Amino acid sequence: MSKRELSRMKPSPVPLATLIGREIRNEKVEKPFVKFGQAGLAKKGEDYFLIKTDCHRVPGDPSTAFSVFAIFDGHNGISAAIYTKENLLNNVLSAIPQDISRDAWLQALPRALVVGFVKTDTEFQKKGETSGTTATFVIVDGWTVTVASVGDSRCILDTQGGVVSLLTVDHRLEENVEERERVTASGGEVGRLNIFGGNEVGPLRCWPGGLCLSRSIGDTDVGEYIVPIPHVKQVKLSSAGGRLIIASDGIWDTLSNDIAAMSCRGLPAELAAKLVVKEALRSRGLKDDTTCLVVDIIPSDHPVLLPTPKKKHNMLTTLFFGKKSENSTNKATSKLSAVGVVEELFEEGSAMLIERLGKDFPFDKNSEIFRCAICQVDQPPGNGLSVNSGPFFSPASKPWEGPFLCTNCRNKKDAMEGKRPSRPTVTA
Ligand SMILES: [Zn+2]
């Protein structure tokens, strides 16, 4: 046998460029179907949801379509939930540069989500209303799912291997030690309600205000250390697809992630949402607003969800993307990358704005105009800028190395970190 024949018998290694090319082509050709269902029962009427399947990355271009699914569980009234439902999406999208590629757009999303959440909170607080809301905001673009959330409305992912993963973090003082420590360090007091006789009851709350959540949008009457900075997680599903279940705590106070997923497996999304709500009510009755969205991301060439894909494919995607960020806040989350079916592209949960906006925030250095990275308002240099306004003029003791922020947004940042807005300059 000649050398040539021998080499022909061995499986020839596929060049990486070819693999990359295949991956890109597959992405373009096989956009998944997205099917969804919604169900809910109101007790207080403070749950709101958003389903929007006709969003375009490039306005007017249907080939750039993506979908948004969100739940807003309000408290102390409904206005924060309604305001967030109506404004959050626009605030996120306006923080993404225009005319960028799909990949760049997806990469810009996590930071834009942080900006959108903070902007929505800041603008709602100007109204002087005291209500607040959770926000669990899911963007589905092809096989890529990006979830941003504050509060305790969870989003879980049920993959075709039957593995259930939590894509959000519960921002509850009772269950989240890290958040408890952050709130306390920023000047909040954490404790339970005292009833007659000095007995403590109920979950841990933050005082003043008595909120059980450590992050939310709104809540003007609660300390600013209850921040609107979302935990963000971005994953890419395998071409077998998967199911998202997004629901308010009316579901999760009763059902575990696994039970919720199992209670509706194999059923169409519409029916699945109804069944999850029914299952939650069966054991406990209607104690709280209960809202559930089920979103199926399904291969377009298969009308139903496929069985678990082979490992070979996963090795390819792992090789291709790798894991970009460590989970910084939640140790309970299933390690998606270890499962192999889903590729973890991004995860970050820090409540510090500098860690979320970064030092390399894209802005036009040649521009005569400073644009605030959060509220997107333009300020010409010299106009309303004090000595310590921007990245170039920060006081030596506390340099802010992030992007340009206007005076209002800088005050907001300081307040969220527990520094008093009236004393922004802290000397060491
Ligand atoms: Zn601003």
Image: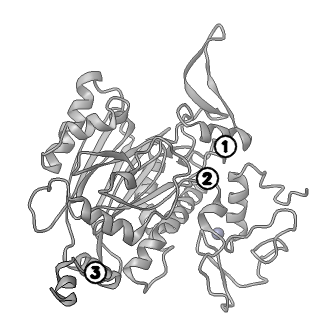
Q: Is residue 255 left or right of residue 205?
A: left
Report x, y in % for residue 400. Answer: 75, 67
Ligand 1 quadrant?
bottom right
Asked whether the residues under the numbered discs 2 and 1 touch, taking CB atoms below 8 Å apart as contact, a structural biologist would say yes
Q: Is residue 321 left or right of residue 379?
A: left
Image quarter of the N terminus:
bottom left
User: Disc 1 on helix, strand or loop?
Assistant: helix
Q: Nearer the viewer, residue 227 or 164?
A: 164
Gap in angstroms between the C-alphas marked 2 and 1: 8 Å
What residue is disc 3 on?
A: 14
Disc 1 residue type (three-letter)? Arg
Q: Nearer the viewer, residue 141 or 22?
A: 22
Tag in front: 1 or 3: 3
Disc 2 residue type (three-letter)? Ala
Q: How many marks?
A: 3
Tag in front: 2 or 3: 3
Which badge, 1 or 3, comes first in the chain's sequence? Answer: 3
What residue is disc 1 on?
A: 182
Disc 3 residue type (three-letter)? Val
- Residue at image position (57%, 41%) is 214
What residue is disc 2 on?
A: 351
Q: Is residue 144 visible?
A: yes
User: Disc 2 on helix, strand or loop?
Assistant: loop
Residue that lies at the very extreme toward the left in this rendered image: 303
**Label 3 packing within 10 angstroms: few (<14), some (14-19), many (20+):** few
Image quarter of the C terminus:
bottom right
Report x, y in % for residue 208. Answer: 67, 34
Quadrant for residue 402, please give it.
Answer: bottom right
Which badge, 2 or 1, comes first in the chain's sequence? Answer: 1
Residue that lies at the very extreme toward the top in this rendered image: 197
